[in-house]
Amino acid sequence: MDDHLLGWLTTLDEDRLARILANRPDAIAAPWPRRLDTLARRLSDTFAVMEVMRGLPLPPLEILQACLVIGDRATPEELARFLGVTTAEVLPWLEELYDHALAWPGPDGRLRLAGAVARWWTAPCGLGEPLSSYLDSWTLNTEGLRRVSRDLGLSTQGGRRQMIARVTAALSDADRLAGRLRDAPDGTVSLLDEFAWDGPVRAVDGGRFVTIGTPEKWAADRGLLFRPQWDLAEMPREVALALRGPDYHPPFTPEPPEPGTVPVDPEAVDHQLCLAAPHAVDRATALLENTDKTPLPLLKGGGVGVRETRRLAKETGCTEEETRLLLEACAVARLLAWDETSGGLVPTKRFDAWRLEEAPARLRTLLAAWWRMERSSLRRVAGRYPTLLGDDPAGETVARIRWAVLTTLATLPPDAAFASLPELVQAVHWRSPLLDRDLLAECGPAVLAEARLLGLVASDTLTTLGRALAALGGGCAGDEQDETVPEVERDPGLMEASVHALSAAQRTALFGADLTAVVTGPPAAELAGLLDRAADRESRGTASVWRFSPASVRRALDAGYTADSLLEELRAAGAVPQALGYLVRDVARRYGEVTVTTVGCIIQGSDPGLLAEIAAHRRLARLGLRLLAPTVLAGGAPADRTLAALRDAGYAPVPVDDTGEISVRREPQGGRLILLPGGRVAELEEPPPVHLPEPTPDPREHARRLALTGREEVQAGQTWAVIGRMATRLPTAQQSLLGFVVDRGVRALITLSDGLTATISHGELRRGVLDAWCEEAGDYLEFPLAEIASVTSG
């Protein structure tokens, strides 16, 4: 814990404390802190600080780097002087840092930084460690320090600290250093400039540091360069600043770059949204239904191969880009998963529920999956797409780039689009400077292409659907591995935008006498599914065209339709011409001229009389046996069940290979049967309970409570004595575990004398009771020590 941070927190009013907690929800996550010292520990956590810094724009990060360079002398005025701006320009961004508890003013007016900030930047502003860290190191003894002082023409009198102060002052003075460089060997100035501007660490030839007369040895003898390894050299911070000169100021860009824009028609953007969103839902459904018929195999190294991707795209009428994006989104949404029995990817039980939902809900499922997806489907590496559903080493960063790009686009007005991609990338970098700049430039075009396919971007600007998604930010995106329903799907703003995006979807078609069906506009997913099952799609776009044929109608009958049920659904979508009715009934009349029977197993024997006896046996009637030939019986039950029944009836059958047993890919696991279009039946399990997120903690309420608590300290050092005296029901080992709950906040399961159990942590002792966080209650509760009957590790 940082004592300086705790001291500052005790001076804050409720408003400032509430702003800090609003910006740092990690600090008040359950179990929420009860005192300011606990809050200070959470605020100074290394990983929490680094996560907060990822979400900051460029100016506060530039200020943090400048503070690290200035060191203990940092004040708002000194910081402004070093940056070359006025104090008024620095103060708003300092307030931003204060509100995130990354920096705070000390009682003497000097700025203090969270310890994790220095661990993030080992070379702020491209500068190395302070000179004192080299001069006061164990690698440089007192005699070596005297040698450096003599080479600089300084006095060697006094102790080590006096010599370090004189050397530091001499090397920090730009004029004195420039004077010394006049007598340096040729090449010294260029060597030092490379370290000062492109350092602080560079690879060197170690031999030149021990060769007399070389610029490297001259610089090392005078403390301008230090060599931690044979082939690496570093330049101290003060030396680099002196070489950069008194006019040097680190970069500070308080104003965001404004990308060039071009005007767009919002109505045209909205029209493109209403075309793209229904199309995305329609194509996702087609892809999943195709994998339901033909499992999608994976490569040995993981992922889906190019050949399978193109086959799937051709069979469903999708482009390769649509196939890649929607398959990966469906996998993240748990609509598609590996099935060991089938040896490929097949739709999951969640898909059965998904396709019965309303179209806006299906669209939100795809958007939520894309929003948290840790890969870029359309990002090209070396001119090629990566393996579909393969691992991406930059996964989390890719998701952050997606959030940053859409958030930046949301700053543009609805009637303006960005003019050039490099300007957009520059604007994104200002808002998220810790993102890898090269990866951002590489993923930016892919993110925009994916967003266009999902209806989030049109004409290089965000649609209303895209703005609703961008407004959520990355905080509620969730984890790609999270099995629960993401919070994004239930956002009211996104729900409204998704309904609007699908409001223009057409639910009727124009059936022609030439056996075509035309949908003017984006077809609803239900209509597109019906037509895809009964006809072949010939074109898509502003208008989509399907053509009926004997083969397509037979495909619908294979899916479970009858002539009457198919014509009934087609009539619900529009007026069916006589020619189409004739076609459907003619195909249905010839449908089934040849039948194919599925059997569970085959029973063979050399005695026709014995097989006739078995076929007529009353106890074996449930096996559905029928005589195919005098020595061959066909049964409806599988081989193992038939074997058991025959043995129970007193016969002695033996199993043989190649019995013709049919492998069933996905057996019902209980649940409900849902009637799908065409008379098909899908098993739908009872939906799992929806895990609602915990309510967002109220920062002001916590700030009010913490401000009242102040720096209240709980008596320490008496834990074991109090527990040993009061928790008399517990053996010594369990008393020790309860003590760790108090002193270290560990998790444990306690049982009270009345049989009640609770999972507790972060306990405190108060007047004979244990005041601890109870996971079941989601709050702090009091447990009498005398009533605790047992304690086990949680």
Image (tube, rainbow, N blue to C red):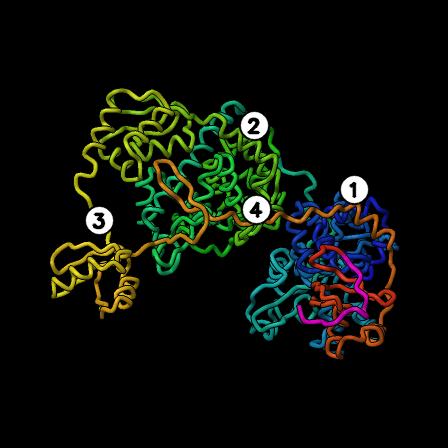
Q: Which residues are magenta?
A: 780-794
- Distance from disc 2 to disc 1, alpha carbons, whole Å, reads 34 Å
Label 1 with label 4: CB-CB less than 8 Å: no
Mark 2 or 4, closer to the camera: 4
- Badge 4 amino acid: Pro
- Distance from disc 4 to disc 3, alpha carbons, whole Å, reads 45 Å
Of label 4 and label 3, which has the lower sequence position? Answer: 4
Of label 1 and label 3, which has the lower sequence position? Answer: 1
Image coords of residue 134 (percent x, y) = 71, 70
Mark 2 or 1, closer to the camera: 2
For residue 786: magenta?
Answer: yes
Please tell me whether mark 3 sits on a helix, a strand or a loop: loop
Image coords of residue 297 (percent x, y) = 34, 54
* Count of numbered marks: 4
- Mark 3 — residue? 597
Quarter of the figure with the C terminus? bottom right
- Distance from disc 3 to disc 2, alpha carbons, whole Å, reads 63 Å
Please tell me whether mark 2 sits on a helix, a strand or a loop: strand
Q: Residue at x 47, y 54 (%)?
A: 392
Task: Count residues near mark 2 (Cα–Cα under 10 Å), then give few for <14, some for 14-19, many for 20+.
Answer: some
